[in-house]
Image (cartoon, rainbow, N blue to C red):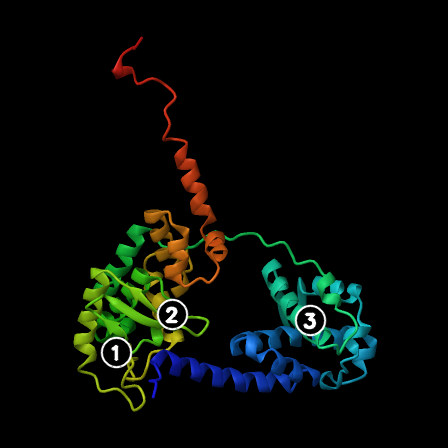
Amino acid sequence: MQRTTGAETYSQEIDIKNTHKLRELSSKLPRFCRQYFRGIADNTSTRTRVAYAHDLMVFFEYLHANNPECARMAIPDFPLSLLDQLTKTDLEEYMDYLSYYEKDGKVFTNDERGKARKLSALRSMYKYFFTSEMIDRDIAVLIRTPKLHEKAIIRLDQDEVVTLLDEVDSGDSLTKSQQKFHEKTKVRDTAILTLLLGTGIRVSELVGIDLNDINFRENGVKVHRKGGYDAIVYFNDEVEEALKDYLAERHQIIPLDGHENALFLSLQNRRITVRAVEKLVKKYAQLVTSLKKITPHKLRSTFGTSLYRETGDIYLVADVLGHKDVNTTRRHYAAIEEDRRKEAASYVNLHRNESAGSQA
């Protein structure tokens, strides 16, 4: 019988929560959306379907408020034939609406990325019903994707990484209330941050690690990758030392039932959550820089940047980070490639070295 890993258990728990959320959202959407979500279940994650449900809710609420025909009926009663009745202009007006709108007294805005995400949800729904031959037209493909501007990679510089780990060790800059818990968590927090910075793994991968997923003979740790497969990620001596220091404490803790195998535990002695790791990263990062919004993903970017600068091998970076498509990695680190090309200009000296003297 195959053992269920901590990462798989954590993933299953998230799927259950997302499934409940999707059912809740689906009850407020047109009834035909339930068939759509069932139809794409094999090719999408529960997280993706929940995100689509949120974005489709914005679309159908817009129609209910702005389309006279739709205003006459409740959103769950919208017929599938509505998708055929809408025009390209209707969708273009919706995309324009997304720039700025109000709901329940709150103002919402979407930049090009927010619009592109919501258009992706529409395209997915239209494509499903069109390819299933349940509607006659797929007008969503006629809407142009907003032009996305590449964002600069936010990451920690090397001196900021050193300062960050020093702050975790000392706790001197923490508030008095934070310092009360610091002695109990600093070894664990050091291990978490060192592992994130030293391997580039995702926070969802980190929280799923079990005690027996670590192999110090090879300095490797098994993680459950995005996409549902397991991979071995290797770490250096600094990560090894931080993990061993934490394990010395971890073996003295009695976990709650069901959390015995978890590597990283919360103060409640249960498997630590993604949210808890995000909060501890934010807590320490704020002591280092107030200009950068540092998240666990930014620590992943910090690792990826360091690895690419050292090796110049984009395929290696993609493999270590677990990117299925190297073009994803290339887009993230294009700015570094530009820096390397600029540096190349200084490698060639067109003037003769004066100290070398003249030659015939």
Q: What element carries label 1?
A: helix
Q: Which residue is drawn at 73% across and 73% down?
A: 130
Residue type beneath disc 3: Lys
**Picture coordinates of residue 249, whole percent (x, y):** 18, 77
Q: Quadrant of the C terminus?
A: top left
On residue 325, the disc is none
Residue type beneath disc 1: Leu
Q: Is residue 216 left or right of residue 231?
A: left
**Picture coordinates of residue 150, whole percent (x, y):** 53, 52
Q: What element carries label 2?
A: helix
Q: Quadrant of the N terminus?
A: bottom left
Contact check, label 1 and label 3, Cβ < 8 Å: no
The residue most toward the top is: 360
How far apart marks 1 and 3 lie (CA) works out to 44 Å
Residue type beneath disc 2: Val
Q: How crowded is mark 2: few (under 14 residues within 10 Å), some or many (20 or more)?
A: many
Judged by depth in the image, the label closer to the viewer, 1 or 3, is: 3
How far apart marks 2 and 1 lie (CA) works out to 16 Å
Q: Which residue is drawn at 29% across and 51% down?
A: 159
**Picture coordinates of residue 257, whole percent (x, y):** 29, 91
Tell me the residue that label 1 is attached to: 211
On residue 127, the disc is 3
**Picture coordinates of residue 219, whole percent (x, y):** 23, 66
How far apart marks 3 and 2 lie (CA) works out to 33 Å
Check the image and report above or below for 100 versus 32. Answer: above
Contact check, label 3 and label 2, Cβ < 8 Å: no
Which label's residue is closer to the chain start, 2 or 1? 2
Q: Is residue 269 left or right of residue 319?
A: left
Judged by depth in the image, the label closer to the viewer, 2 or 1, is: 1
Q: Residue at x 79, y 63 (%)?
A: 89
Tell me the residue that label 2 is attached to: 203
Check the image and report above or below for 277 versus 26. Answer: above
